[in-house]
Amino acid sequence: MPDIWDFLRTPRQEWPLRPVPERVRDWREVHAPGRSLPIVQDQASRCMDCGIPFCHHACPLGNLIPEWNGLVARADWREAAERLHATNNFPEFTGFLCPAPCESGCVLGIDDAPVTIKAVEAAIASRAWEEDWVRPQVPERLSGKSVGVIGSGPAGLACAQQLTRAGHTVVVYERDDRVGGLLRYGIPEFKMDKDYLNRRLDQLAAEGTVFRTGMDVGGELDAGTLLRRHDAVVVAVGATAARELPVSGRELAGVHQAMEYLTQANRVQEGDYDRPAISAEGHHVVIIGGGDTGADCLGTALRQGAASVVQLDIKPQPGVQRADDEPWPVHARVHRMSPAHQEGQELVRDGAVLAGDSSGLPPQDALRDVRVFSAATVRFQGDAAGRVRSLSLADAETGTRRPLPGTERTIPVDLVLLALGFSGPENPEHGLAEQLGLRATATGAFARDARYAGGRPGVFVAGDAGRGQSLVVWAVAEGRAAAACVDAYLSPTGVSALPVPVVPRDRPMGL
């Protein structure tokens, strides 16, 4: 039995990363191997098993975090895996990709470092696969009803798995040539090994879920056809409409959307071709946008051998402590260092890459990493051939984010990656929307009611397509919840035994 006072005696210890010089030479996972080593049990034992576990409430899936922490601390890995999968279809997706709002809600985090919940979750999921505890759950009987799911990202896959296990015949329609959505082509290999995705897809297929790739629903394939073919249709196409940067010079060659760049890099890893058409090799790269997609671009550019890399964030640099208006248990905006930023910091320090032209940016020895905060992009300048060669930026005014007069400077660049986030589904008023009777909200997402229904009868909307750009954990939660609503719609009784972890109006705790 673990000691109930371990949270006082055991300090937080992050899962170790592979050395930077080693990991930037390949595309394998950045973490050191061996997730079932004693470090995980020691970290799980720090959990206080609180009377009111805010980590549980901070997670939209309602993960039973104190339960599986206690089971890992007692080395009962198999039962821990059972409790983890009870609320989460894909714990390795969230364990590797989620920013862990559960840790922000950890009660221990009020005056100490929170439990490493994310690392424990990933360790349990990895152990479950290693021990062959993850098996297909084939339904005992079929309902005679069929459901079409449009989109194979985390929301679509979670919804499909729940409905398949409930006995419905489910077909997932994916526009790309492979299943997985942004999990496949948007997330770099070093951030989440695609084997984790592939084995889950094998599990879904073994349970009875059918996948159809190369299906452009709303384009070449009329969505109304699916509604006639199936008893219900779930729209889980994500929010893939990238935000633009309306400044002079945007049309220049060498200025690309981040997903265009990341998709090509991922296709190289899939073996589609040897070299991407857009590569950072030997280039002076500027990444515009301070979120996770920008960090993914950074890690990719470093592995491709960029000559220099700068990441511009229009927001001010956050502090290392919570701001007064973001108290515990809110997932506060604090200064975080992702593995990609650590790589950039170390490589700049060692001279492997430059952090940009010091005439336009702070000197390298003053840079803590390759990010420049409160930086507003003013314009791009190109050469006679129409290719981008420099970028003008200025300090961003606090609040308005407008460029401050007198602060403009220019830095050299020949590859710009726009990582400004996503506004919602593509063409929210045409194609798929028209064919299914969907209505776009003011934010650009698809409208739905409290039961995830939207548009024509039998149409449901799940994930970022209805919520807008969000986290992978919210996508999985919405996929599970939408599945319960579809199951109830198809049931003669109008009720479902499937869980509904979130409803469309739910938002992150405290925000």
Image (cartoon, rainbow, N blue to C red):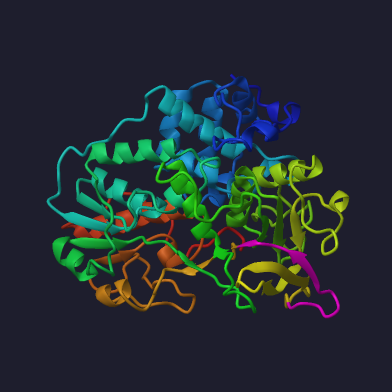
Please give the range of residues in magenta: 402-416
Pick out the residue farthest to the left: 144
Q: Could you say where residue 179 lies in the image, as x and y percent from the top left?
A: 34, 49
User: Is residue 219 at all visible to an observer of this figure?
Assistant: yes
Q: Could you say where residue 493 lies in the image, as x and y percent from the top left?
A: 18, 57
- In the rendered structure, the answer to whether residue 133 lies left or right of residue 211 reads right
Query: Would residue 275 be counted in the magenta stretch?
Result: no
Instruction: Give the tally of numbered discs.
Output: 0
Q: Where is the N terminus found, in terms of image quarters?
A: top right
Above-or-below relation of 74 to 399: above
User: Is residue 497 at all visible to an observer of this figure?
Assistant: no
489 and 146: which one is in front?
146
476 and 76: which one is in front?
476
Q: Could you say where residue 123 lies in the image, as x and y percent from the top left?
A: 53, 30
Q: Residue at x 36, y 30 (%)?
A: 134
Image quadrant where residue 405 sits: bottom right
Above-or-below relation of 373 to 269: below
- In the rendered structure, the answer to whether residue 109 lies left or right of residue 448 reads right
The secondary structure that most of the magenta stretch takes on is loop
Q: Could you say where residue 358 lies in the image, as x and y percent from the top left?
A: 84, 58
Q: Residue at x 44, y 40 (%)?
A: 194
Above-or-below relation of 217 to 122: below
- In the rendered structure, the answer to whether residue 147 lies left or right of residue 344 reads left
Q: Residue at x 36, y 35 (%)?
A: 199
Q: Where is the C terminus found, in terms of image quarters?
A: bottom right
259 and 6: which one is in front?
259
